[in-house]
Image (cartoon, rainbow, N blue to C red):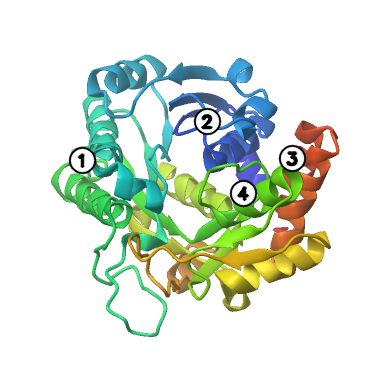
């Protein structure tokens, strides 16, 4: 990964959603690689949060702004003049999307359009990677992993808003950033990245399985509540798709037109487990805690989500490297160190270094 680290050194990077869980990890990686990072996001909405623990605010050009505010987003993009953009700003919670559907649609669809329009107007961004989700696919109830060419759709507001965002991305590519017109009418290449259920240290969001386990075991000494125990999900450590985003951004920056479009980043086949199985493995590693099932039929989620990542593996050269045991242990080790008052910045950097050393 030495070439990847060298590539990002001194590059001007803009990350939207940098105060979130995935955004904070991505920001930390790029700072470790000496990139020049700017971030646009709302203030962190949990206490504690990874953004504050890593002291990111003082180390980047930080902007607390709402992605729905086009005027503000446009001003920041024009001021920062990024070479590469990672778009992670979103309302990311399925259950919250039932309670705030309009906010979810505005953030995930109009917010994406705002970012793309700002990129269009500045006319100098080379590479844009927009992170969506594995939940963009229409559930046709076939028992095979989803491919990038499958139909888009979504039952809940979150999934459908992200599917709509993918349509917006495709529209901007075909209307303004066509690979066929690259270097003739524009110099920007855009891709979307669809990854599975991402876990790792530093996530305290509500209604996510690992944060629910951590809060129940370390903070409240109560049973973990499961609402959808049979749901099968692709569990992967946050660093796995982050590598995919970085590789993709590099290819786009280098003008590789064939990398424009949609990409799946899923884990090893053995990392697909039910929610119940994941909880049981996590509690076994922690050697404490228990769970109860409390179903909520009013807020349904897809039962089966698997991603076909053959395109990323064969074309991009990306590979998932962590097995399920390593994924869970890395995650839980981070939290155990946090609740033991250890140096969390050093630990996070150690995990980043360990992961990227595995790629050599």
Q: Position of residue 343 (x, y in %)?
A: 83, 32
Q: Earlier in the sequence, mark 2 or mark 3?
A: 2
Q: Earlier in the sequence, mark 3 or mark 4?
A: 4
C-alpha distance separating marks 4 and 2: 17 Å
Q: In this rendering, which labeled residue sits more in front, label 4 or label 2?
A: 4
Label drawn at residue 249 = none
Q: Residue at x 26, y 48 (%)?
A: 165
Examine the rendering and report whether any part of residue 90 can be seen. Answer: yes
Picture coordinates of residue 155, whole percent (x, y):
26, 63
State how far apart marks 3 and 1 are (Cα). 43 Å
Q: Nearer the viewer, residue 344 or 96?
A: 96
Q: Position of residue 161 (x, y in %)?
A: 26, 50
Q: Which residue extends farthest bottom?
A: 143
Name the residue beneath numbered marker 4: 211
- Reading the image, the residue beneath label 3 is 348
Among numbered discs 3 and 1, the one appearing first in the sequence:
1
**Label 4: few (<14), some (14–19) or many (≥20) C-alpha neighbours in 10 Å:** many
Image coordinates for residue 328, horizontal then vertical, percent: 71, 61
Category of crowding for the residue at label 3, using alpha-carbon neighbours closer than 10 angstroms: few (below 14), some (14–19), many (at least 20): some
Query: How far is the residue under mark 4 from the one under mark 1?
Result: 48 Å
Tell whether 269 sits left or right of 329.
left
Q: Earlier in the sequence, mark 4 or mark 1?
A: 1
Compare residues 280 and 216 and report the one nearer the observer.
Answer: 216
Q: Which numbered disc covers residue 184?
A: 1
Identified at 37% across, 36% down, the residue is 126
- Mark pair 3, 4: CA separation: 17 Å
Quarter of the figure that contains the C terminus: bottom right
> Image quadrant of residue 349?
top right
């Amino acid at each position: 990964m030495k070439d990847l680290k060298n590539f990002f050194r001194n590059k001007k990077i803009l990350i939207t959603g940098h105060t979130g869980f995935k955004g904070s990890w991505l920001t930390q990686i790029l700072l470790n690689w000496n990139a020049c990072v700017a971030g646009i996001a709302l203030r962190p909405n949990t206490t504690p949060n990874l953004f504050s623990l890593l002291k990111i605010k003082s180390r980047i050009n930080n902007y607390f702004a709402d992605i729905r505010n086009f005027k503000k987003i446009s001003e920041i993009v024009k001021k920062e003049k990024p070479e590469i953009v990672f778009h992670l700003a979103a309302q990311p919670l399925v259950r919250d999307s039932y309670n705030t559907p309009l906010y979810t649609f505005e953030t995930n669809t109009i917010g994406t359009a705002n970012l793309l329009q700002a990129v269009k107007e500045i006319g100098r961004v080379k590479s844009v990677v927009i992170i969506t989700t594995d939940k963009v696919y229409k559930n046709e109830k076939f028992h095979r992993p989803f491919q990038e060419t499958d139909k888009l759709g979504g039952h809940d507001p979150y999934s459908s808003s992200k599917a709509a965002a993918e349509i917006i991305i495709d529209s901007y590519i075909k209307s303004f950033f066509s690979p066929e017109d690259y270097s003739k009418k524009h110099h920007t290449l855009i891709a979307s990245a669809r990854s599975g259920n991402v876990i790792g240290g530093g996530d305290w969001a509500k209604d996510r399985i690992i944060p629910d386990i951590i809060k129940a075991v370390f903070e409240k000494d109560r049973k973990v509540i499961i609402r959808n125990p049979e749901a099968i999900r692709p569990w992967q450590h946050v660093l796995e798709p982050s590598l995919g985003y970085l590789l993709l951004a590099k290819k786009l920056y280098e003008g590789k037109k064939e990398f424009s479009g949609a990409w799946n980043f899923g884990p090893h086949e053995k990392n697909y487990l039910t929610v119940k199985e994941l909880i049981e493995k996590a509690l076994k590693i922690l050697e404490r805690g228990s769970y109860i099932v409390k179903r909520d039929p009013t807020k349904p989620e897809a039962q089966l989500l698997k991603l076909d990542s053959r395109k990323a593996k064969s074309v991009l050269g990306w590979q998932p490297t962590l097995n399920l045991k390593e994924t869970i242990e890395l995650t839980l080790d981070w939290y155990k160190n946090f609740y033991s008052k250890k140096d969390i910045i050093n630990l996070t950097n150690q995990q980043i270094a360990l992961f990227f050393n595995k790629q050599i």
